[in-house]
Amino acid sequence: MLSESRVRIMLASLGCLLFFLSASRATGEQPLGRVLYSDATCLRGVPVPGSETLVPGDILTTSAEGSALIELKSGTKVKIVENSSVRFLLEGETVRAELLSGAVVSESIGKPTMIVTTPTYRFGPAQETESRYRVQLSEEQTTLAAAMEGNMIITAWEGGEGFILREGTYVSIPPGALGKTDQAATPAGRLGADHAGTIKYVVPEGVVKRQGEGAEKTLKVDDIVNWQDVARTSENGRLRVALADGSFLNVGSGSTLKILRHAPDMQQIQVDLNSGAVRAWTRPDTNFNVQSPTAAVHATGSDFIVQAQLDGARVYCIEGMVSIQNADPAVGGQVILHAGEFTKVDRRLPPSAPAPAPNTLLQSQIDLLAVPPANANRQMAAKPLPGWHIGSLREAESVGLLAGIAAGAAAAIAVPLATATPASPSRP
């Protein structure tokens, strides 16, 4: 006999499937979910009239008196409280709620299908059962997270180390605590004049050849990479490099690259990718270029992948926009990729027209460049990182700001579906 929990999951999934099939036909885009209920809320800068379809890249903002309830295709519900702003993105089959300000509450009844992210951390359920958790980002950039039902996992962007927050507890992480990304903790120019960045992860082997030195040196975590250095990974090796401007590089297996600087203030960076693959997260104030034997790629404030061979290259845009030309200036043609698109650039040919990258294809390319690898056993910290404070939601100190987490969040997310007034999904 099916358990009550499993029946709930099946009914919720069936209802969502029927709704989103019709929504997909209406919008022409792949929907992530829908707004079930909203009050004093804007979506894409326009007041939400009622039920509205949510697609990748949408930003939902609530006013001082506002709130909203989102239902994802998987059945996960997301409560957005007052004075909050959240961008919804798609990473493979997982929805990412990028918390720009304020707070969100997530409730799921099965396999985790959504994570919440801040500029420093990723938050998500630690199990495939019922879960409810809240993440809040204060104006001072203090992070508050509470596990109200089930455990949650918190992962630092920088090193990938995970910490399990147990049910009934909360964590307060001040902006100065360890685990911050280099983008926030290491301003541009803090490293020496010759230093391009720092190795944040290496598996199982990578080497670097420094300019003027004959022998290659084995890389290890926290090693410095200088401008003009040539870094190389083995056939099953990977690297993660935090650049001095705050950008990041994930370097795939069998890759060879050189990091160049074209301006003293580091506002223009070039990566010469002779072979292999690299994923780059770039800052919006840096002109970032990746040059392969056949492709010249330019981006600012984007997340993209470049795969390079001697006779061709492929470029995938995960987030933002990317401009691509042939590496030979004599070959004309330029294409612009948006999120979820890819192109290929063969020798002596202009880039192919942008084509949609199916989620399965895009996720496979992301997995190939995951650092640590997606199938690696993530090391969980036995204790919270220095600067973190862990407390019980039942403690007296949780009264006040955290009282809303303990007492109000469960009721806040349980908005009766009858209060929503679904209309035909539409886009302005």
Image (cartoon, rainbow, N blue to C red):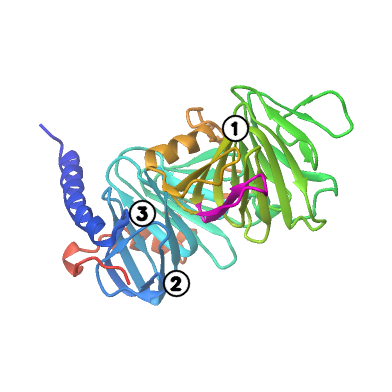
Identify the amino acid type marked 2.
Answer: Asn
Residue bearing mark 1? 311
For numbered disc 1, what is the local secondary structure? loop
N-terminal-most mark, 1 or 2: 2
Q: Do residues under tags 3 and 2 come within 8 Å of each other at their CB atoms?
A: no
**Which residues make up the magenta segment?**
319-336
Identify the amino acid type marked 1.
Answer: Asp
> Which residue is rendered at x = 56% and y = 68% of the image?
139
Looking at the image, residue 324 lies above or below residue 344: below
Identify the amino acid type marked 3.
Answer: Ser
Residue bearing mark 3? 106
Q: Position of residue 271 (x, y in %)?
A: 70, 43
Is 381 placed left or right of 224 in the picture? left
Extreme residue toward the right, this view: 212
Of the residues tagged 1 and 2, which is closer to the observer?
A: 1
For numbered disc 3, what is the local secondary structure? strand
Q: Position of residue 244 (x, y in %)?
A: 74, 49
Residue 317 within the magenta-colored segment of the rendering = no
Using the rendered image of the protein, determine whether residue 315 is visible from the camera's viewpoint: yes
Label 3 to label 1: alpha-carbon separation = 47 Å
N-terminal-most mark, 3 or 1: 3
Quarter of image, res 395: bottom left
Q: Do residues under tags 3 and 1 come within 8 Å of each other at their CB atoms?
A: no
Q: Nearer the viewer, residue 401 or 277?
A: 277
Residue 83 circle label = 2
Residue 150 circle label = none
Residue 328 within the magenta-colored segment of the rendering = yes
N-terminal-most mark, 3 or 2: 2
> Which residue is rendered at x = 54% and y = 57% of the image?
143
Using the rendered image of the protein, determine whether residue 383 is visible from the camera's viewpoint: no
